[in-house]
Image: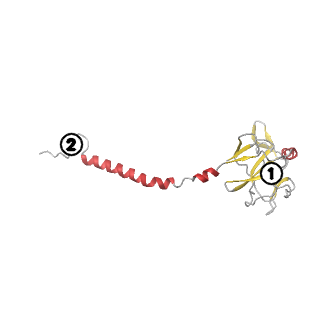
């Protein structure tokens, strides 16, 4: 009598090979079904994703005023600059190569982290910065009209004396870098989306 569990010679596999293949497939699917929730739990939650970008209404911010909003747990300074503040920032701009605006050819103001004012703003009248000192993470003063703003009219960090100009560039003190410019876009003339 022929063994019905085996196929004819040269016909390929046996029923046992088929059962091994199906068992391995079921085990792989079961493992994926168990592991996927753990991997998925590492994704940011909905409330964290909601904080990754914010929309700010800037219609009430008058020329010369500044507001502070919170984004990703950090203060963000939004200043509606006066024409005098814009002129002061542009006056100290480093000179760039006309063929490649990212190349600084002269830095007459001696900026430690040379950047042009135009590279730090999308609209000259609106300056948007992360309000964290680049030295040790303090929050500089200068958002209120009564705050000390240092010699350059921007921000002053009282902890170690760093002073920033009206473009948020470091001018004096131990901070190594300019105040960070976050990713932002103007959705309308009165609404800016940060993040």
Relative placement, left or right, of 195 versus 118 is left
Q: Which is in the foreground here, disc 2 or disc 1?
A: 1
- Can residue 192 be seen from the camera position used here? yes
The location of residue 116, given as percent across then percent down, is 79, 44
Earlier-in-chain disc, 2 versus 1 = 2
Q: Tell me: residue 127, above or below residue 74.
A: above
Task: Tell me the crowding category of disc 2: few under 14, some 14 to 19, or many 20 or more residues within 10 angstroms, Cα based.
Answer: few
> Which residue does the image show at 35% across and 50% down from the upper left?
26
Judge whether 76 appears above or below 106 on screen. below
How has the structure been colored for display?
secondary structure
Q: Would residue 111 be seen by someone viewing this image from the given angle?
A: no
Question: How far apart are the alpha carbons under marks 2 and 1?
Answer: 83 Å
Label 2's element? loop
Say which residue appears at 24% left-offset and 46% top-offset.
Answer: 15
Q: Which residue is mark 2?
A: 7
Element carrying mark 1: strand
Q: Nearer the viewer, residue 170 or 57?
A: 57
Asked if residue 38 lies left or right of residue 92, the reply is left
Q: Position of residue 41 (x, y in %)?
A: 52, 55
Give the residue displayed 42% in from the left and 52% down from the top.
Answer: 33
- Which image quarter is the N terminus in? top left
Residue corresponding to mark 1 = 66
The one of 128 and 112 positioned closer to us in this rendering: 128
Q: Position of residue 191 (x, y in %)?
A: 73, 43
| Marks 2,1: beta carbons within 8 A | no
Instruction: Please state if 133 lies on the left or on the right of 72 as rendered.
Output: right
């Amino acid at each position: 009598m022929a063994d019905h569990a085996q196929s004819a010679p040269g016909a390929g596999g046996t029923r046992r090979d088929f059962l091994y293949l199906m068992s391995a497939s079921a085990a792989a699917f079961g493992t994926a079904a168990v592991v996927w929730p753990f991997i998925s739990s590492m994704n940011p939650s909905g409330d964290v994703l909601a904080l990754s970008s914010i929309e700010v209404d800037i219609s009430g911010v008058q020329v010369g005023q500044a507001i502070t909003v919170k984004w990703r747990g950090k203060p963000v300074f939004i200043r509606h600059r006066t024409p005098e503040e814009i002129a002061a920032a542009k006056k100290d701009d480093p000179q760039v190569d006309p063929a490649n605006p990212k190349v600084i050819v002269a830095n007459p103001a001696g900026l430690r982290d040379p950047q042009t004012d135009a590279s730090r703003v999308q609209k000259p009248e609106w300056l948007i910065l992360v309000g964290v000192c680049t030295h040790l993470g303090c929050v500089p003063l200068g958002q209120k009209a009564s705050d000390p703003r240092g010699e350059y009219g921007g921000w002053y960090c009282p902890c170690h004396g760093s002073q920033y100009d009206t473009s948020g560039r470091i001018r004096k003190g131990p901070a190594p870098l300019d105040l960070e410019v976050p990713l932002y876009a103007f959705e309308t003339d009165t609404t800016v989306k940060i993040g």
